[in-house]
């Protein structure tokens, strides 16, 4: 019997790093190593030291390999999927000049608005990049850095995304992929290249940016001796280009050209996202028109406030996160960190509809409803971006795949089920971002198309399927009415 071979898929998220050790042939998840990150900042600021990400990656890989009980020699490849949009600026030695600005840092909202106007409005940006600048996007953060920290912007010898930074540490080679690059607002999803006019608008030299691999599965190099020693892995194993976390989750689900197309996914994590893999190039100002990791597209809507915001409300009320009831007349929009969809970067939470008989459990339920509604409302626009008619019964009946940490929570699942009315699938395969990265690593090591690899791996998974239910239109209409009528000043926007 030949020795078992494995690949390592890394999920470097906002809060932590996970390193999944996955059997190359069967896709069995053998072990997951974990290490925490540190996020700092008050008000709209959210920053992390990229060196913390590297140390966490090393610790998570070592922990995962130890848990698996396998020798390091069994590892054939590694790939990183990282939190999108973060701005990392490096000196000539590859060291960070300052803490990275994270995706949920909202200080660059004025710069996003200025950039949008300078190119001629939202439609102009959508035509070029697929995406309109908001505070989350890397272009807005670069403009903020140039205006607020010009010394470090001027000193930058390299500009990277979080996953780019880590991949370069692994292989010693600068590289990114179309998926993560498409979240910068300086990469054109039409030409599949950096946009010279946009770089000029930003005052950003293309020489500071990494080359863009054709897909996230391209082998961009081999693990260097220095990285191999730090990780306890063999020198020379395959290093894939990697991708952004949402793109990697799509690969892990088997979404893409060699798998499912135009099937919606709802991810419940620190942020809430809804996305689908599609052959159609998205062109909607209401969505982010990203590229996918495999050469297709990934139209996506993202909210800033999801599981952490609801957990904060539970803490304030002194309740367990599942000690909740439907909100009744109460509406709670938990925009605690500003909001991205809708674009209200300086917003605060809003509570209305209180009565004498409103219970703490209903207030918590209202927080769930507000967070779920905000991301679910993008489903129709997502269908249109895929070239589908959301009113078509067949399209409306397509199951919604529910992933992320919230998908393991009873109240989250119940709330999404009730507000959407759609059939739900909760995939049996866990750690989808890390598994997607593992599929990219397997592909880079010679395993074929990454989406096909993940599809084969998922055949043994036992998915939970929930049939469609009657939609709670009363709650839906109540929340929508409050959100639509609330003025920007009322929301703190």
Image: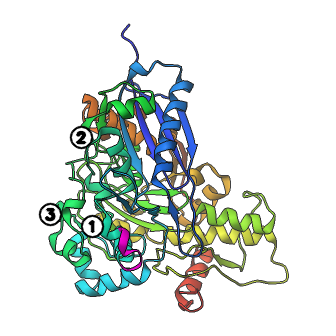
Mark 3 = which residue?
Answer: 191
For the residues bearing labels 2 and 3, Cβ distance under 8 angstroms? no
For the residues bearing labels 2 and 1, Cβ distance under 8 angstroms? no
Q: Percent position (x, y) of residue 182?
A: 29, 62
Dominant SS of magenta comes to helix
- Please provide the residue range marked out in magenta: 147-152
Furthest residue toward top: 1
Front-lying residue, 361 or 10: 10
Identify the residue shown where x is 37% and y is 54%.
Answer: 263
Residue 282, disc:
1
Looking at the image, residue 412 lies above or below residue 66: below
Q: Secondary structure at mark 2?
A: strand
Identify the residue shown where x is 37% and y is 68%.
Answer: 152
Please name which of the two marks, 2 or 1, marks the residue nearer to the observer: 2
Furthest residue toward right: 356
- Graded by Cα atoms within 10 Å as few (under 14), some (14 to 19) or many (20 or more), the crowding at tag 1 reads many
Mark 2 to mark 1 CA distance (whole Å): 28 Å
- Graded by Cα atoms within 10 Å as few (under 14), some (14 to 19) or many (20 or more), the crowding at tag 2 reads many
Identify the residue shown where x is 58% and y is 69%.
Answer: 371
Q: Secondary structure at mark 1?
A: loop
Mark 2 = which residue?
Answer: 220
Front-lying residue, 379 or 286: 286
Q: Percent position (x, y) of residue 422?
A: 51, 60
- Compared across the picture, whether 146 is left or right of 210 comes to right
> In which quadrant of the rendered view does residue 72 lie?
top left
For the residues bearing labels 3 and 1, Cβ distance under 8 angstroms? no
- Specify which label sits upstream in the sequence, 2 or 3: 3
- Magenta-colored stretch includes residue 250: no
Please name which of the two marks, 2 or 3, marks the residue nearer to the observer: 2
Mark 2 to mark 3 CA distance (whole Å): 21 Å
Looking at the image, residue 288 lies above or below residue 455: below
Q: Percent position (x, y) of residue 125?
A: 25, 77
């Amino acid at each position: 019997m030949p020795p078992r071979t494995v690949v390592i898929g890394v999920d470097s998220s906002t809060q932590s790093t996970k390193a999944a050790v996955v059997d190359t042939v069967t896709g069995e998840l053998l072990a997951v190593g974990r290490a925490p990150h540190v996020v700092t900042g008050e008000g709209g600021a959210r920053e992390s030291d990229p060196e913390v990400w590297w140390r966490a990656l090393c610790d998570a890989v070592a922990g995962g390999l130890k848990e698996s009980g396998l020798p390091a020699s069994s590892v054939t490849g590694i790939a990183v999927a990282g939190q999108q949009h973060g701005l990392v600026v490096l000196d000539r030695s590859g060291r960070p000049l300052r803490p990275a600005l994270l995706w949920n840092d909202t200080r660059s909202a004025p710069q996003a608005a200025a950039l949008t106007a300078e190119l001629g409005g939202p439609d102009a940006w959508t035509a070029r990049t697929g995406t309109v600048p908001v505070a989350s996007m890397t272009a807005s953060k670069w403009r903020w850095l140039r205006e607020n920290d010009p010394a470090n912007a001027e000193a930058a010898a390299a500009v990277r995304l979080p996953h780019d930074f880590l991949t370069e540490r692994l292989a010693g080679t600068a590289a990114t992929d179309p998926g993560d690059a498409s979240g910068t607002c300086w990469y054109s999803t039409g030409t599949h290249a950096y946009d010279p006019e946009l770089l000029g608008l930003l005052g950003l030299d293309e020489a500071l940016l990494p080359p863009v691999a054709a897909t996230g599965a391209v082998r961009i190099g081999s693990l260097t001796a220095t990285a191999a020693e730090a990780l306890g892995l063999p020198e020379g194993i395959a290093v894939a280009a990697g991708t952004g976390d949402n793109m990697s989750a799509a690969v892990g689900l088997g979404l893409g050209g060699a798998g499912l197309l135009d099937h919606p996914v709802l991810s419940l994590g620190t942020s809430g996202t809804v996305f689908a893999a599609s052959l159609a190039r998205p062109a909607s100002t209401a969505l982010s028109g990203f590229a996918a990791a495999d050469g297709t597209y990934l139209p996506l809507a993202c909210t800033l406030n999801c599981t952490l915001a609801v957990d904060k409300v539970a803490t304030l009320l002194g309740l367990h996160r599942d000690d909740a009831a439907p909100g009744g007349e109460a509406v709670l929009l938990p925009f605690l960190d500003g909001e991205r969809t809708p674009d209200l970067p300086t917003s605060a939470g809003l509570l209305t509809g209180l009565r004498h008989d409103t219970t703490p459990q209903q207030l918590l339920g209202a927080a769930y409803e507000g967070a779920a509604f905000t991301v679910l409302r993008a489903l129709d626009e997502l269908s249109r971006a895929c070239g589908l008619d959301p009113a078509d019964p067949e399209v409306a009946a397509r199951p919604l795949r529910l992933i992320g940490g919230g998908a393991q929570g009873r109240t989250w699942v119940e709330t999404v089920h009730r507000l959407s009315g759609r059939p739900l699938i909760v995939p049996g395969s866990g750690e989808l971002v890390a598994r997607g990265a593992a599929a990219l690593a397997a592909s880079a090591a010679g395993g074929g198309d990454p989406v096909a690899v993940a599809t084969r791996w998922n055949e043994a998974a036992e998915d939970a399927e929930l049939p469609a239910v009657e939609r709670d239109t009363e709650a839906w209409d109540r929340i929508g009415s409050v959100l639509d009528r609330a003025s920007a000043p009322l929301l703190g926007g």
